Amino acid sequence: MTIDPLVLMTDVEEATEALLRTMAALDDAAIGAPSLLPGWTAGHVLTHLARNADGYNRLLTWARTGVETPMYPSREARDAEIEAGAARPAAEHFADIRDAHERLADAAAAMPVEAWAFVLPPLGRSAAIVPWNRLREVAVHHVDLALDHTPEEWTDGFALRLLREFAGDPPAGTPAMVLHPAGAEHPLVIGAADGPAVGGPSRSLAAWLIGRADGAGLTVSPDGELPRPARWR
């Protein structure tokens, strides 16, 4: 089912407000604490989120104007920006996330209806995918700050969409399995229908698949160890 991108931008707004509430309690020492991402501090995660918003802003500009505007000049430039901004004070990170989100929200509001159908070459998808991509970045990386925000804060709708995205385009090396999210009408097949069946709450399944949980509480049939998901993003 297609979801109106502006409806999803409302979800992005809510997820960003939740992130800013978490950030309001951070001091400068917390910015330098390790995140759940190897080699990255909380400051790296937050700088990435701010620059990611600017990158999606550029893609929406491309879709709206037709003028090629890459998300980042290069992978190296992206990485250099993250490294350069990681150690800033907490107040600067807060303002950066807030302002970058507002710029992205303004860019989305300025999109004519037809511009959402513009296919962005870097994504291979229409611009309508940008709000979902941004929501996923904010929701998942909020967890990566390794604070009090966990996958249990995700909505079931977000978790189910994340599961469907993973199942539709699993990372290379993902083992075969059949996912049975609680309450979902249909299972999600990854690889082959004869793979082990893994069941549980949608949020727990999604967090386990993308490496943000260990799978405790999930069921597997036939009995045995849970499959080992491939590294995601």
Image: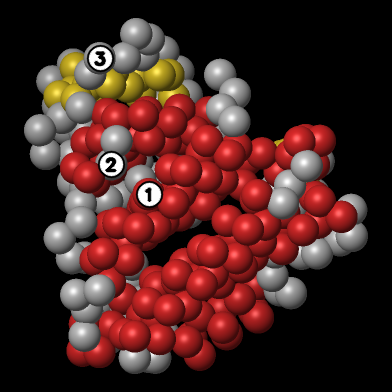
Residue at numbered disc 1: 14
Q: Image point 51% across, 39% down: which residue? A: 8
Residue at numbered disc 2: 154
Query: Which part of the image, by quadrant, shows the N terminus?
Result: top right
Mark 2, other Cα within 10 Å: few <14 / some 14–19 / many ≥20: some
Mark 1–mark 2 distance (CA, rounded to whole Å): 11 Å
For the question of whether residue 118 can be seen, the reply is yes
Relative depth, front residue between 140 and 90: 90
The tag earlier along the polypeptide, 1 or 2, is 1
Q: Nearer the viewer, mark 3 or mark 2?
A: 2
The tag earlier along the polypeptide, 1 or 3, is 1
Relative depth, front residue between 99 and 72: 99
Q: Is residue 60 left or right of residue 221?
A: right
Quarter occupied by residue 152: top left
Q: Image point 52% across, 52% down: which residue? A: 134
Q: Nearer the viewer, mark 1 or mark 2?
A: 1
Residue 179: give x, y in percent of width and height: 32, 22
Q: From this view, report whether residue 193 is shown above or below residue 80.
A: above
Q: Is residue 187 left or right of residue 1?
A: left
The local secondary structure at tag 2 comes to loop
For the question of whether residue 194 can be seen, the reply is no
Q: Amino acid at mark 1?
A: Glu
Q: From this view, report whether residue 188 is shown above or below residue 124.
A: above
Q: Image point 39% across, 71% down: which residue? A: 45
Residue 118: give x, y in percent of width and height: 81, 41
Q: Is residue 125 left or right of residue 26?
A: right
